[in-house]
Amino acid sequence: LNLGYFKSVSVDIQSLSATPAGSGAPQLVRVVFRVVENPVLRRAVVEPEGELGALLSKAGASPQALAALLELPKGQVAHGPSITAQVQELPGKVWQRYGVLVAPDRIDLSDDGTLTVALLPVKVARIDVEGNQKTKSHVITRELSVKPGQVLERGELERSLRRVLMLQLFEEVNADLRGVPDRSDEVAVVVSVKERRTGNVQLGLTWTAGEGPAGFLEVSDSNFLGRAQQVGITLSYGRDAKRYQLSFTEPYLDSAGTSLGFKVGWQSVLTTDSSSQKYFDERYGGEVTLGRPLSEYTRGYLTFANWRTDAPLADRSGWSTEATRGTQRSLKLSTVTDTSDHPFSPSTGQRLRLSADLAGFGGTFRYKKFESTYSHYIPVQLGKSRHVIAARLSLGTLIPEQGTPAPDQELFRLGGAETLRGYDFGKFWGTTMAMGNVEYRFPIVKPVSGVVFFDAGQAWQPGEPVDLQELQWDVGFGVRIDIGALGMLRLDYGMAKDVEGGNFNFSIGQQF
């Protein structure tokens, strides 16, 4: 029977001896093995039960495709162990190819050679969270669209884990599936996380090309009390730049994921106006931002800002142009679409940010400002190393109300670590801007990676026609050093065609 080719095997013992039993003489018998052979396998049928049929059909699994997953030879006597092995492998094949978790329910081999395998949908019995020391478990589970009682689908699970990762609270997010005792049609989903350090108290010195040296104190936490609330206090004092800011964001006002944040602050930053006068850009006030998911990958924001701006000259002998002084009240509509695979070091996907800033509402400045930024990430696999081609395109225009000047603080400024790395900070300015950046990112040795880049861009002043032949460009190289909880140090050296030598730039995190 264990050969696997027979449905049944029985034994019959028939006596052949004429000598009476009990006489002490040997008895002769015939041992007859009666076997019922399995039928010849003609075809295989996989029957999804309940809601499973619709889910598999949605995933593109036709009845013929499901039957083909049972790799059994037709036209031969059905072999039981081979059938059992293929049925045991069937759930894994369905999961990998169609992303739905299933379990065999019954197996039937009819006399005409038809093998029928019935499949049950495997549902989520419970969701457990492991590895979170600070973060509340509900902060993680509320991001999961996978819920107990639902049939487990791989695509839904992967999207859920990505949403948890994009909270920017964790270095790693994974899921493990564990069986439930005595329930083959249920599974426990265990989400394991490795937390990042989100709370920081920093005291130190900074130096930037545009603002010079400054001392700073920063207290921040992007996971305040383990609830994913963002709170920050920044105090920065330098000769050319002073900033004081308080901010707070509640990411979940309701079950739909509506967020509410506010920021209040005061700053005084030395800058240069459109007539090359140096002045202090002084402003105080605040803004309130309401956010809400619009789709799986898109989030919308509405920001109301109210800032009072002043512009004393650097020597305090007077004021800069009137275009730099007054009250700025604006309403900003923006959307962010992000399909990338990682919040800090993406290797696939796209990001698109669109914004429209409308200023007026009784304030001094009246203008419309439109900006868009599109980033694209392409992975390049070279052996065991994964390289990335990253590209970004940014466009913007500022349209002041007729008869009013464009506020100097809102002009586009290109040059420096975040834009054109071969030029000084704010080298090019204007009311219209176009810029592109391309980077080739590659690993060197953990935790160091390298970058070669090309930047091109220009800002056109009011009344100037946009001419792409006027684009300025630079090339360069850099290194990225991952220092764990403190983020990624970025060191870039850019060389421009019309600048002697090159520019060294230092910053935190990827440029885009």
Image: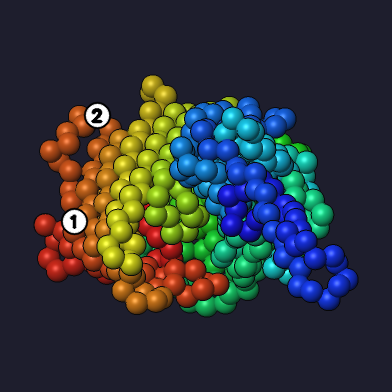
Residue 463 is marked as: 2
Residue 2 x/y as whole percent: 63, 58
Judged left or right of residue 379, residue 87 is: right
The percent coordinates of residue 18 (x first, y second) are 78, 61
In terms of depth relative to the viewer, which is nearer, 71 or 400?
Answer: 71
Whole-percent x, y for residue 74 in the image: 46, 38
Q: Residue at x 51, y 33 (%)?
A: 42
Image quadrant assignment for residue 461:
top left
At label 1, counting other C-alpha atoms closer than 10 Å, the crowd grade (few under 14, some 14-19, many 20 or more) is many
Q: Residue at x 72, y 30 (%)?
A: 50
Q: Which one is in front, 184 or 407?
A: 184
Q: Which residue is mark 1?
A: 474
Q: Quadrant of the N terminus?
A: bottom right
Q: Please give the name of the residue rendered at 62% of the width and 67% of the height, measured from the top-left corner.
A: 194
- What residue type is disc 1 on? Asp
Mark 1 / mark 2, whichever is N-terminal:
2
Q: Nearer the viewer, residue 1 or 383?
A: 1
Q: Secondary structure at mark 2?
A: loop
What is the secondary structure assignment of the residue under circle 1? strand
- In this view, which residue lies farthest toward the top? 402
Q: From where the camera sits, is residue 251 visible?
A: no
- Badge 2 local density, few (<14 within 10 Å), some, or many (20+)? few
Q: From the viewer's perspective, is 473 left or right of 53? A: left
Type of the residue with mark 2: Gly
From mark 1 to mark 2, how far is it between C-alphas?
Answer: 26 Å
